[in-house]
Image (cartoon, coloured by chain):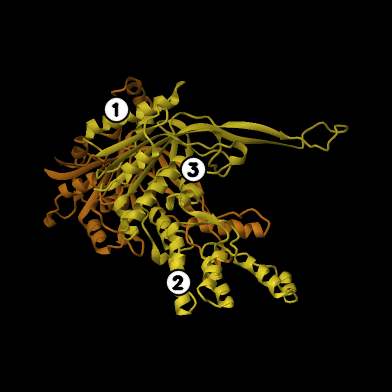
Amino acid sequence: MDDYLLFRLYGPLASWGDTAVGEYRPSYHHPSRSAVLGMLAAALGICRDEEERLLALDRDYRIAVRVERGGELLRDYHTVQSPPEAAIQGLWVKSRRDEIKALEAYWAKRGKPPQASPVSQRDYRTDAAYSIAVQAARPEAHRDLAPLAQALRRPGFPLYLGRKSCPPALPLDARVVQAHGLRDAFEHYPSCLAQLGVLLADSDYMAYHTGRMLAAQSTAYYWEEGFDCTGLEAQMIYPRRDRLRSRRRWQFDTRDEYHATTQEEQEGA
Amino acid sequence: MARFVQLHLLTSYPPANLNRDDLGRPKTATMGGANRLRISSQSLKRAWRTSESFQSALSGHLGTRTKEKGREIYQALLEQGVKEKQAMTWAQAMAGVFGKLKVLPKKQKEALKEASDAERRAALMTELEIEQLAHISPEEGQAINTLIASVAESGEAPTDEQLNLLRARHTAADIALFGRMLASSPAFNTEAAAQVAHAISVHKVTVEDDFFTAVDDLNDGQEDVGAGHMGETEFAAGLFYLYICIDREQLARNLSDNTALADRTLAALIEAAATVAPTGKQNSFASRARASYILCETGDQQPRSLSVAFLNPAAGMDLLPTAIDRLMQTRANMDKAYGACSDNAKTLNAVTGEGTLEDIIACATEAG
């Protein structure tokens, strides 16, 4: 019997950063291990510049994701008004409002409307629901998962699903369970949809609709090397570049991500 | 001090296109399988951050808006015995911190050389004026007076460092809440204390098209009876659910533990969020609205938005009361399922007339 930390991630919008160069900021289909460990780090109150602690977190835990609903893609058109150097030269630009005013004055003088600002396309996943399992990767280091669960309940920093504008819409409901293998661990943990069914069932106008509105797609599991995967047979192995090498230099290494999809019935669906 | 302040707002906008995508259509998102209207997080933050209301609220609405500060400073310097030329330069330096100063065109300046002393002095006074109305808080006014006294005594020009301090609090509040702005040095990266979610409509929405024509006034219809221009504008009306989470400890850290400024900043944000709308297409739609319902929660528990209340799109004739009920019901259900998700709460309900913005702000800024 092993210890697993389980919690769920659900929000109307979520974004799991994939390799991004330039203005197109894509989202991966489900959380990466760096996203989950980042969230744990935030919960533990670890600052972005605490390189050692972040590396330790990356070394000491392994994660798996149960995708209950992959959700749909949302591409957001995101512009940023940035004043050219000439617009703010010699001025005391003390706040964002000053910046915008300087920009407007600069273009007004030239008799043109403010020119096209840097445009980016940022991807989000909508209506996506996940459960996450975390296990200590080095049992000899005797990592107790209970403090992690407690940190998720009372986090050191506000949590978000990939981007700061994506707050969780359900309490993470972190629990430490004992189970025989990863699949068994997930079985002990109610899915987002089941939980939403419970949460919204009180109101009669919701019970009927929730299941219909959020019809479950098939359940997918993604996990990494080292888990006891009894009952799960990997159908695909993907390389994923989300193993932390250096937070400061923003460098990641690749690792193997195992994937299996099952056709199991979800409660509440 | 409760660590997290969560604000849930319901704001109803009549037909509008507050935030549009690259095709000019109002932004949307799918939630609970249904299409919803959306105002992006970045659009909300920009509207609040650059609003007159936010600026004014930062000084507790006690500031003055003026272009004449330069002249005031000049006069004060003269009174304290500073020589005219120096007073002019120093006054310009200080006023310049608050906005771009007017500059006389070259030709006019050349012409002044022939003019009388009095005329020249009067004309040069224009160069002490700030081009746009600057907002000066009582504290900033105080800082200016202190600096005037200091330079009058030392006889030396104000240093860049001293000038920088004149509006330090202003920068601090802006960046503490929303993170650095583009012009600031990357060395001063600050973790934003405010988390603003994308605003989503509580109901299903279909974006509508307004087909419009522009008539050519000089076309007498002899040859061609058509319109000068035809086009389509997209718009939609929505009751939006907004969620904001502020980490008070982060805010305090960002403001070097200046509690008074932190509270004022928080109050300014709440006021802006309740009253300021993004400016997209406002000239065509004049869609200005205030929050009809605000719920403020404080606590140390993991913050969570209440959007699940609207997972099943709200519908029916009485949308606002329905939405408010749903929000309250969902909150109660969550507390029942997970234990209390917050320690304290306060509401403002424009439908029933209970609660005030002051109460909300008091709840959010409560000490201990």
Tag 3: amino acid: Val
**x%, y% of residue A9?**
30, 41
Tag 2: amino acid: Ala
Q: Find numbered disc 1 in the image and state the secondary structure of the residue it sits on.
A: helix
- What residue is pinned by disc 1? A197
| Position of residue B103 in the picture relative to residue B361 (left or right) | right
Tag 1: amino acid: Gly
**Residue, x 51% and y 65% (percent of image)?**
B97
Pinpoint the chain carrying mark 3. B
Residue B186, by quadrant, is: bottom left
Front tag of 2 and 3: 2
Outermost bottom residue: B155
Q: Find numbered disc 2 in the image and state the secondary structure of the residue it sits on.
A: helix
**Residue, x 35% and y 51% (percent of image)?**
B263
Chain colored orange: A
**Label annotation for residue B276:** 3
Tag 2 and tag 1, C-beta contact below 8 Å: no
- What residue is pinned by disc 2? B149
Q: Find numbered disc 3 in the image and state the secondary structure of the residue it sits on.
A: loop
Task: Give whichever of B209, A190 is nearer the camera.
Answer: B209
| Position of residue B129 in the picture relative to residue A193 (left or right) | right
| Position of residue B293 in the picture relative to residue A193 (left or right) | right
